[in-house]
Structures are given as C-alpha cells and as structure tokens.
Amino acid sequence: MVNETVLLKLLAGGKINLYSYLDENNKRHFFAEKDAKTEELGYVKYISNAKYFVELPFYIETLKSLTADCDKVKIDKPKFTEASIKTIVEKYNSCFGSTQSFVLAKEKAKLSGGIIAGVRSTSFDYVGPDHTVNKAYSFPGADQGEYNTTTTAVGGIFLDLIPKRESKQLSGGMQLFYQQTGTFSAVLDKPNIYHREYNAKFSYLSAGVNLKRYLLKTRRPAIYIKAGVGYNYLLSQTATAYVNDAIIGTPKHVDFMEFSSSGFNYNAALGLNLNRLFVEVQYQHDNIYSNPGSTASLTGIGLLVGYKVF
C-alpha cells in the first residue's frame, strides 16, 4: 500500500463537502466528506480481454448512501463529471440549510528545468572519399573501415513546458547536451601493399526541441516516450590517418578529412518519471558533414538520469 498526501480542492460545502483532485496522469478524482468521514467516489473503467469495455461506477452507490437522508435527492445514473456530482451535493446540502459553491481556478502552464547526465555508447560512420586515397590506385579509404564504439559521459540541461493538467498530457521542451567522444579507430591492412590507420574524435554541443507524452496512467512511476530534432555544433575534431602504401611511398600522418562545424540531429527516448527524478534510455543520431559527396554521423544509445531543479 502506498500512502500519499495530496491537496484537495473544495467544490461544494455544507452537510457534505465535495472535493476534487486531478492527479499527475490527468485522472480526475472526487471525494465526499460527511460527519468527519471522507471517502472517494470511485469510478473504474478498463478493457476486458482486449475486446469489451467495462465500467464500474462505484460512485453511484456511494452517493445514494451519502444522500439517503434527503428526500429531495433522486439519483439514477449521474455522469462522472464535476457538474453532475456537484449538482447532487448542492441539492442535498439545501435540505439542511444553505450550501456553498466554489469554482476551480484555471491552472496555467508552467516551466520546469534542471540538469541531466549519464553515459552514451557512440558509433562513428563515414561515407565518401578521403584525402589520403590516390585515385590512380584502387586502395580502400576511410569509408571502408570498421570503427570501434566508444562509451563516454554526457551532460546538459533541459527546460520543459508543462501544460495545464486539464489539457492533453503532451508537453514540449528544450535540451542542451555536451559530449566528448572517445577515439574511433579503424585499420585497413594488406601486407606489402598498404597499411592505413584511421582515427577520429569529436567534442560537440547538441541543442534541440522535443515532445513528450505519458503512456501509462499510473501515479508513480510514470512511463513516457519522447522524440525531438535539433542542431549540433562541433567544438573540436580530430580526423587523422597513418598511411603506409608501398606503391605510393613514404609513410606519413595526414588528415583524412575536415568536417564542417554544424549539422542536424534527431533523437527518441523511453523514460520513467519519479517526480523530481527521471531516468531515460535515449537514442540520438548526429549528422556532421564534410565536402560534397561525403557525410559522417554519430549514433548513440545512452542511459541518462535527470533532476528537476524547479
């Protein structure tokens, strides 16, 4: 059993006090207080055997029991809405004198922000020619290398726009990450003909916007999915090759490519929200460009933990 303290909003006052509460998963709850005893007006609905829609309106019997001492109240099949239940309670309270009615203030959208950090396993992919290949020979280039995957830390900040709870549970946000990859290496070797060692390493900022939607209507923890697009900016890059081609001549260290400073990215995540703390598994694909006809990309899977500061 989980005990939780929540703030109830008074809708009607008198012999019966009627309260309302909207939980973090957008589910409305009603509570009735009579003779110093408070009970929830329960209502359950679900799909049975993936075919039949089942409703269990426990609130109807609870209302009949609470209002049995007032002949003015006749309850048939009231809807599970604020207006319907409030009307019944106000009519009941009028049997015992005056009744008070309250209107809920409209909630406003608000901002939430904090920090996020974790680890990301990143792979490097290159397509196109490179500066080290002499077109007179059919030697392989950087695009034929099998580069290792690196795992490094990643960190950043986020800002979420949380909509009114009465609206659909879809929120938007922004995020900014910094990552420095490990060294991606590939070796191409054919004894007595060629030997090439390629190494690439990057540090960059990644900024973007995203949409988030909750999947399961449970109080805690809440599961969500998130997707977004953005822009990345290279802060530093290394793309060097050690070339030892027997036909061409002297071994040398050269830059096999210089990449442009910016590109676009897209990402998706599956997360678990634990109030201020959340954990998510994130996929991110960052495109970086070089000269026309060649592209490179960084693809990462990360485990991230975030904390809402406000």
Image (cartoon, rainbow, N blue to C red):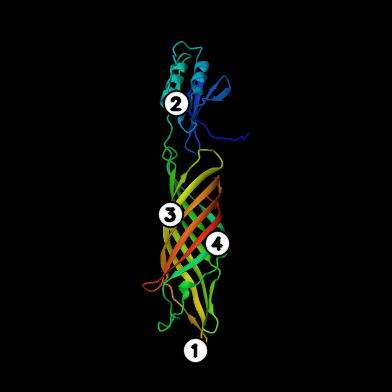
Question: Looking at the image, is mark 4 or mark 1 nearer the viewer?
Answer: 1
Question: Looking at the image, is mark 3 or mark 2 nearer the viewer?
Answer: 3
Q: At x 51% / y 50%, what residue is drawn? A: 270
Q: Secondary structure at mark 4?
A: strand
Check contact, mark 3 vs mark 4: CB within 8 A: no
Q: Name which residue type carries label 2.
A: Phe
Q: Residues within 10 Å of mark 4 (few under 14, many from 20)?
A: some
Q: Which residue is mark 1?
A: 249
Check contact, mark 3 vs mark 2: CB within 8 A: no
Measured from the top left, where is residue 88 in percent x and y? 44, 19
Q: Which residue is mark 4?
A: 121
Q: Name which residue type carries label 3.
A: Gly
Q: CA distance from mark 3 to mark 4?
A: 19 Å
| Dot 3 or dot 1, earlier in sequence | 3
Q: CA distance from mark 1 to mark 2?
A: 84 Å
Question: Looking at the image, is mark 3 or mark 1 nearer the viewer?
Answer: 1
